[in-house]
Amino acid sequence: MAIACLGLGSNLGDRRARIEAALAALRADPAVRSVVASDLIETDPVGGPPGQGRFLNAAARIETDLAPHDLLAVLKRIECDLGRAAGGPRWGPRTIDLDLLLYDDLCLESADLTVPHPRLRERRFVLKPLAQVAPDARDPVTGLTVRALLARLDAGA
C-alpha cells in the first residue's frame, strides 16, 4: 500500500462541488483505501492568462494499491468525467485539476509524469493545504517535510 499526496484545484463553475466530486470519485475507487482531505482555500491564479477567476484548492492524502502511472490515469479519468477539456492554455482556467504531488519516497521522471511534482516546493497554494493532511511527508529530492517546505516559503527563503 502506497501513500500518495494529491493537489486539487478548480476555478470554473461550481468549484466546491467539483472538488467534492473528485474526492468522492477517489473514495469510490476500489484501489484507494483511504482519502483524507484538507480544508478548501481560495487563492489567486498563478501564471496563466490574465482575467481568470480565483481558485479553490485542496490537498488529499490517500492510501492506494495503484502504481504511479495507474493513479495518474485515474486522476485524468476523474478530470474528464468532471468536465475538464484536454488542451487549453498552460495554467489557464479549469473545471478541475488533479495533480500527483508525492508518492511514498519515489522520484520518477517520465514523459507524462514527474514525482515529486516539479513545482511542489514553490507553491504555497499546494503546500498550505498539504500541510494539513501530510505535514510530515518528505520531499524525496530535498529531504524536507511539507511543514518545513511551507515554513521556508513563508520565511521567503
Image (cartoon, rainbow, N blue to C red):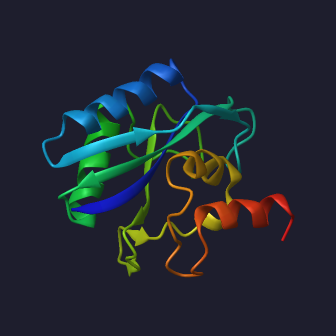
- Can residue 48 be seen here? yes
* 134 over 17 or under it: above or below: below
* Observer-nearest of 24 and 10: 24
Q: Position of residue 137 (x, y in %)?
A: 50, 64
Q: Residue at x 34, y 41 (%)?
A: 35
- Can residue 82 be seen here? no
Q: Position of residue 28 (x, y in %)?
A: 20, 33
Q: Residue at x 86, y 65 (%)?
A: 156
* 152 over 81 or under it: above or below: below
* 52 over 120 or under it: above or below: above
Q: Residue at x 27, y 63 (%)?
A: 2
Q: Can you tell which quarter of the image residue 27 is in?
A: top left
Q: Quadrant of the N terminus?
A: bottom left
Outermost residue, left side: 30
Q: Quadrant of the C terminus?
A: bottom right
Q: With 108 as the anchor, is 45 left or right in this view?
A: right
Q: With 86 as the anchor, is 120 left or right in this view?
A: right
Outermost residue, front side: 136
Q: Can you tell which quarter of the image residue 144 is in?
A: bottom right
Q: With 129 as the anchor, is 104 left or right in this view?
A: left
Q: Position of residue 53 (x, y in %)?
A: 68, 29
Outermost residue, right side: 156
* Observer-nearest of 86 and 5: 5
Q: Position of residue 83 (x, y in %)?
A: 36, 29
| Total numbered labels | 0
Q: Can you tell which quarter of the image residue 112 is in?
A: bottom left
